[in-house]
Amino acid sequence: MRQILIAGVLSFIVFSFSPLAAQDTSAYRYILNYDVPLSPGLTAIGASQASVQWGSAAKPVVVHILSDLLQGSTAFGPGIAIDFSPYTLFGGRFKSVNNYRESTLLRMLANTQLSFATTSNSLDTSSLNVGIGARLVLWDDHDLLQNKQLGQDVDKALSSGAPPPPNGGTDGEATVVDAPDLTAAYANARQRVADTKGSSMAIGYGFGAILKGSSLSSDSIFDERHTVWVGGTYWFGKGLNGNLMYQGRFSDTGKPSNVIGISLRTTVPSSVSFAAELVYEFEGDQKLRGGVNAEFPAVQNINVTASLMLEPKAGSDALRLKPQVGLLWNMSE
Amino acid sequence: MSIIRYCDINPNGGTLTVTMTANNGLRAGGRFGLYTMGKELVEDWSIATGDGGLGTYQITTDVSKLDGYEMAWRTKVCAFLPGANEGSIGVEISQNGKLCKVFPSTVWDVTDVPTCESGKLMQKTFSLILQKVVVEEPA
């Protein structure tokens, strides 16, 4: 319940202070069915459903809801995260599509993602794990916004049909209508990029801590951790991609930890995606770990995620399989 | 009550160029029709603002015949960049590089534009009457 309350407060803050929010309740519409990146906030507290990051472009607003199927088996219980792209959320503008494509700075700003996350702490039920993270996409060959063919198909859909009849020099009313040609243009574009070779890279930083007593004050924050990572993706075509990641974890109380990981993912638009990963931690007793995860569209605007990972068992160095399910929710529609 | 829109043209001037613009990453397109006073369609065309936010078309009908003709069009718009869903769609008519006087304005300020990715678009029809203005030749 506390997670939901905190997420609600965070959502309120984010949307209340957005200049767009005041004038437009549906400013954040988007479709959540292609290559959503891992939440930096969940990564900051080590509660992400996958260890190996990939490099895909940011999505405007994503809510991650996690459920721990074996409560108490690890330090992380159920949780929630809100990821958003602050540039568009807070009213950042573009002159044109070319402006986005040609300006590296603008594209980076638009693809910078902030994240707030919280999970319950299984070892101390009065405490919360909290994380704040940021992620910057350096490039993404599969960014649909850079796809010129998609732009041409959209133009075709917008300039099709018969001209309107004469109306004596007066205007009609504005209406919003379904456009099957647009839907088809995006479906074709997603399939086209999934079948195309290319690469992407993203860097991230996350701050995680335990909030004792679930209240925010200087003496209630413990176990502060900093995580940095760089993740790259290479698409082999036909929806298959490989990912390579380095992650460094630093804290005041423990030794730095260096982790590398590789994963193989299938990214099929509007269908089930699978991934298998291997992670090697240079320090610690259990150096090699692995996991599998899947994501599939459930109902409109909601994807379901499921993962099975080898994680250190709470309070010991032994490894234990940790099953987790989650939801990725398009909260704007 | 709707105000009738007029566009002043010089019947002895050059051909008319129609320009459509869209800003803030919005993508717009239009289907245009040119009608006689008897509502007969004499020319039709499409314009898309594309990646650069601008598209043009040069009307081929002899400008000396256009007095009293009506230009009607349907503008369709969607947000190509997610989150950037407000802006302005403009349609301008120029002759010899000079903008023709149009009243009321044909700039359409839009908010809450659906993303193109959502499979929805916003549309609106516009119309104007072309009317000749007498331009005195310098002595």
Image (cartoon, coloured by chain):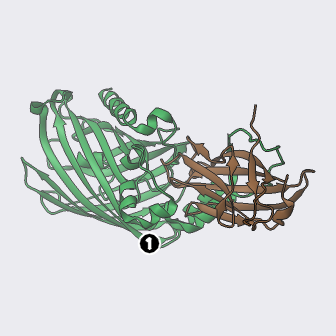
Chain colours: A green, B brown
Q: Is residue B54 left or right of residue B134?
A: left
Chain to which the residue tagged by mark 1 belongs? A
List x then y, in percent, for residue A177. Answer: 69, 43
Residue that badge 1 annotates: A198
List x then y, in percent, for residue A290. Answer: 29, 58
Task: Residue at the far right: name it.
Answer: B38
Q: Quadrant of the C terminus of chain B?
A: bottom right
Task: Give the mark count.
Answer: 1
Quarter of the view holding residue A148: bottom right
List x then y, in percent, for residue A267. Answer: 48, 60
**Observer-nearest residue: A144 or B40?**
B40
Crowding near the residue tagged with mark 1, few <14, some 14–19, many ≥20 C-alpha atoms within 10 Å: some
Q: Residue at x 66, y 56 (%)?
A: B92
Q: Residue at x 39, y 43 (%)?
A: A90
Visible residue check, residue A321? no
Q: Amino acid at mark 1?
A: Gly
Q: Is residue A142 left or right of residue B137?
A: left
**Observer-nearest residue: A130 or A316?**
A130
Q: Is residue A153 left or right of residue A166?
A: left
Task: Residue at the far front: name it.
Answer: B139
What secondary structure is marked by label 1? strand
Q: Residue at x 45, y 35 (%)?
A: A21
**Observer-nearest residue: A130 or B111?**
B111
List x then y, in percent, for residue A228. Answer: 21, 56
